[in-house]
Image (cartoon, rainbow, N blue to C red):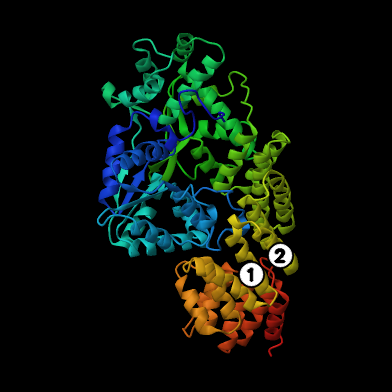
Amino acid sequence: MIAQGAGPWVGLRPFGRDDEARFFGRILETRKVAELWQAHRLSLLTGDSGVGKTSLLHAGVVPYLANNAAHVVPIGDLRYRRTLPAPVITARGRPLFALLSSWQPTADPARSVGLTISGFFRRQTSGAPPGVPILVAIDGAEDVLRPAVASRPENRRFREELEAALKAFPSVHLLLSVRPDCVEEARALGAALGAPPERYDLPALDRQSAIDALTRPLLGSDLQFDSGVPARLVDRLTTGQGRPGDALVDPVLLQVLCTELWEGLQGGGRLSAVVKRVLDDADRMLAEFCTRTLFTLTTDHGLPTCEIGGWMRRTFTTSRGEKTHEARPAPRSDRPKEITDTVVRAVEDRHLLKFCPVSGGVGFQLQHPRLASALQRLGEAPLKQPELTAGDLLREAEQAMSAGNPQLAEKYAREALETAGRGDNDIQISARVVLGDIAYLRGEHESACQAYEQALEIELMVDTRSPAVAYLFAAIARVHLLRGDTERALGSARSGRLIPAGETITMLEIAQALWQANRHQAAIKELNLILDRDREHCEALRIRGEIYADHGKAQQAINDLSSVAVAAPPSARAAYMLVASVAVSRGEVEELREEGRRHGMVLLYLAQAVNRRGERDLAVELAFEALRATNPRLSRHHRRQAEKIVRRQ
């Protein structure tokens, strides 16, 4: 792991929108992607991890389009966000909240809770001139498209909602940034739209572009290379045969080089001396990069120090003589059981491996052929790992959450707390929110509540009127409600309502607590206040529809639930099944039963629905499961309803 920051260069992180002034070497690619995006409903930007897709979009394509009067939305992504605690994120799922939040980065995150993708597109198109396409993008779309994760309910609902919104708004042009192993899954979205996607494969940097990326960030500074030196440095990193113009430079390794130069300068060296050290032994620099990265990976995944590096040497390199080693591809399955899919993806994310097709399927190969030699020199010299700040550790925790690794996220969040000083309130609050989210997602409600309460205590000392205070009160209220403590849930939610900036979030929690307390009229009143301000607030409509279904007001329930039917969460679908006079197959019931196997209300709705159809034995099974459910538990009056079915009354 290399700490953030590399002087005039960005280091091993993607370029952001604010880095436009030092983003060089991608003029042709910027224009090609911009033209493709404007001309087609669905475009694919493909490339391996580390080739620069994120950087190109943020620091190249978006500024270029904005400067040419295009209607371009900030780049969307699916990364974990701690801007809202997990309990109050809409029931439709984390990926949807992440995407809507990233498309409106300066807006109150609470706006995304009641918003659908169609609603977002509607707001964008209403202010656009006729005939001007609305340009939206999803970076890292493989996080919901990969076969290993695509079947998860929240990812499936995400794709359904996105597909429906794109069909409804033909002026919206979507660009998906994906890795090569997800191209076919991305193409499937184009098939649903009836418009095959156009694809652009982002290559590595050509030689001159790499020289520009190395030298042009230094313009106007006191740092300047001697004549010919940049070309010699870049040539140490090239791959490809034939003419010099055919050579390609991996952007990650170029930034490894830039970081090496900057660290040498920070250590008191002169630029010429640092350059000589790199030119004399570039493989040493790459070996140190691999050693640091592999140390982090083995530590993160609890593996012996040499486990991943040894596997990579055996699997992805071949020997040609005593001192010559070359890279070779290998099937995805060519690995010991300790090297899990999670580990392989982490190695890919750290830019040591990349996807490649192999005979009979898919595989991986080294990110760069030069790494074949570097891997033979792992640990030649003792290396001191950079000391990470509390902010670095918190970013690692967030990245682990994005990668779906809560165990690793917990490790980094706790380290961030230990590293942060007592007065570092931002870290103290943020790390505790991450820990609360982890506990909540595990169903450890008591631990989640404790973490959120600790974060709230610090937040109240910083700013009692902050929206974050309201969000934490709302999260605590939701956790109390899941535990079946309606009174404490109502108290926490009402405390948060005193803060105007977070009022809508807390009103949703008040409504749900009132409903569980069997005060459904009061709950409806709270939801009506929200809907008076925003009649399309999908979360308020969903909750109100479920309350109507629970209390036998079928038509009102159908009206509300129909308006949020696309990609609705299991509780809304089960409630609709209860009140709608439509035929439902046993398969549909079982699908909802599996998806809501811990959700008391989903199981109760299903029990009531099949009981009305005369399937008494199945209704009793479902009612028993509802009584045992813990996330959420049934309230007292809902338990009585389930018990009545069990007694066959």
Secondary structure under the numbered disc 1 in the rendered image: helix
Q: Is mark 2 in CB contact (under 8 Å) with mark 1?
A: yes
Q: Can you say whether 53 is above or below 590 in the image?
A: above
Q: From the top left corner, tell me how far across and down residue 378 is, in percent.
A: 56, 24
Q: Label for residue 249?
A: none
Q: Is residue 350 left or right of residue 405?
A: left
312 or 531, nearer to the observer: 531
Circle 1 crowding by C-alpha within 10 Å: few under 14, some 14–19, many from 20: many
What residue is rendered at 45% in x and 72% in y?
563
Q: Quadrant of the C terminus?
A: bottom right
595 or 425, nearer to the observer: 425
Q: From the top left corner, tell me how far across and down residue 299 is, in percent.
A: 64, 35
Q: Label for residue 489?
A: 2
513 or 309, nearer to the observer: 513
Q: Can you say whether 507 is above or below 426 in the image?
A: below
Three-letter code for the amino acid on which mark 1 is drawn? Gln
Three-letter code for the amino acid on which mark 2 is drawn? Ala
Quick check: can you spot residue 602?
no
Q: Can you tell which quarter of the image residue 513 is in? A: bottom right
Mark 1 or mark 2, which is nearer the start of the sequence?
2
Q: Disc 2 versus disc 1: distance between alpha carbons?
A: 9 Å
Q: Is residue 443 left or right of residue 70?
A: right
Q: Can you tell which quarter of the image residue 248 is in? A: top left
Q: Can you tell which quarter of the image residue 484 is in? A: bottom right
Secondary structure under the numbered disc 2 in the rendered image: helix
Q: From the top left corner, tell me how far across and down residue 114 is, in percent.
A: 51, 62
Quick check: can you spot residue 110?
yes
Q: Is residue 93 left or right of residue 209?
A: right
Residue that numbered label 1 is attached to: 512
Q: From the top left corner, tell me how far across and down residue 10 is, in percent.
A: 47, 29
What residue is rendered at 49% in x and 74% in y?
561
